[in-house]
């Protein structure tokens, strides 16, 4: 009977297997299982943070190659970018991780690519490449976690980091020209607005002064 007593450390989960089938998952502390060969226990580490990159992760291949074209994603405003991210994860439910899904890490890679593509597909290119990068990463993490939970993978995604978001190199020069033109346009608009804010109050003040002088001149006659 004492042979069935086992201890689960704080960084582990106990996965109880009965005749080759997963029957229970236990947390930290002392527990009991039926003696071998009826039941055995696996004690995988569940606090270790792991990192993967999606199946389409950028590997430095020339953008003219078919592999590179597979990395391209369509943004919400129908532009093309090559996006890459790093996914940080740990085991949330060791029983599900070991027994519910074949090769859960491969499933995670594929699901990561799919989630990133979906989020990018509804986000304008300027937001993806600049001020909304963190929002894109957070939305990808949330969508990815939802799909992993639905598939009972036993995986918890702790963070998604965007590594690289660029237009394809074949069009990057043209893209940069467009961005510079937009920046010039915005600067010209701001300068015009500043000039307007400066000159209009002066013009109104001058008009008021002239009108007052005219009224004063008229009252003398």
Image (spheres, rainbow, N blue to C red):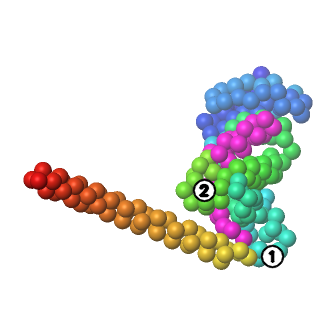
Above or below, 51 relative to 6? below
Q: Quadrant of residue 172?
A: bottom right
Is 53 placed above or below 62 here?
above
* Separation of marks 1 and 2 at Cα, in angstroms: 25 Å
Q: Quadrant of residue 80?
A: bottom right
Residue 176 percent coordinates (x, y): 61, 73
Image coordinates for residue 35, horizontal then vertical, percent? 82, 27
Q: Can see residue 113?
A: yes
Residue 97 belongs to magenta span: no
The correct choice, above or below, for 64 with respect to 85 in the image is: below
Dividing the picture into quadrants, the one containing residue 98 is top right
Asked if residue 12 lies left or right of residue 219, the reply is right
> Of all residues shown, which one is farthest toward the front?
221
- Tell me: 83 left or right of 96: left
Q: Is residue 140 magenta?
A: yes
Q: Which mark is residue 127?
A: 2
Q: Which residue sits at x=66%, y=38%?
A: 12
Task: Give x and y (percent) for residue 128.
Answer: 63, 57
Residue of label 1: 64
- Span shown in magenta: 139-168
Badge 2 marks a residue whose secondary structure is helix
Q: Position of residue 206 (x, y in %)?
A: 24, 60
Q: Nearer the viewer, residue 184 or 221?
A: 221
Residue in the picture at 72% in, 35% down: 93
Few, some or many residues within 10 Å of mark 1 (<14, 14–19, 20+): few
Residue at far top of view: 1
**Residue at 89% from the left image edge and 34% from the top image edge:** 20
The residue sitting at 68% across, 48% down in the picture is: 140
Looking at marks 1 and 2 on the same chain, the residue that comes earlier in the sequence is marked by 1
């Amino acid at each position: 009977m004492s042979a069935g007593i086992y201890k689960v450390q704080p960084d582990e989960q106990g996965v109880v297997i009965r005749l080759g089938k997963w029957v229970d998952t236990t947390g930290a502390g002392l527990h009991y299982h039926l003696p071998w060969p009826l039941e055995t226990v696996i004690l995988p580490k569940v606090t270790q943070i792991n990192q993967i990159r999606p199946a389409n992760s950028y590997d430095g291949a020339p953008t003219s190659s078919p592999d590179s074209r597979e990395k391209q994603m369509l943004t919400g405003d129908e532009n093309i970018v090559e996006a890459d991210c790093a996914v940080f994860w740990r085991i949330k439910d060791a029983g599900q991780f070991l027994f519910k899904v074949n090769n859960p890490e491969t499933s995670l890679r594929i699901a990561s690519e799919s989630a990133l593509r979906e989020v990018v597909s509804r986000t304008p290119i300027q937001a993806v490449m600049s001020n909304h990068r963190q929002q894109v990463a957070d939305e990808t993490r949330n969508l990815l976690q939802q799909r992993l939970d639905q598939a009972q993978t036993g995986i918890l995604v702790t963070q998604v980091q965007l590594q690289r978001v660029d237009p394809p190199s074949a069009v990057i020069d043209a893209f940069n020209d467009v961005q510079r033109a937009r920046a010039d346009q915005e600067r010209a608009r701001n300068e015009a607005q500043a000039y307007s804010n400066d000159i209009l109050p002066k013009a109104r003040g001058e008009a008021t002064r002239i009108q007052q002088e005219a009224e004063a001149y008229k009252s003398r006659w």
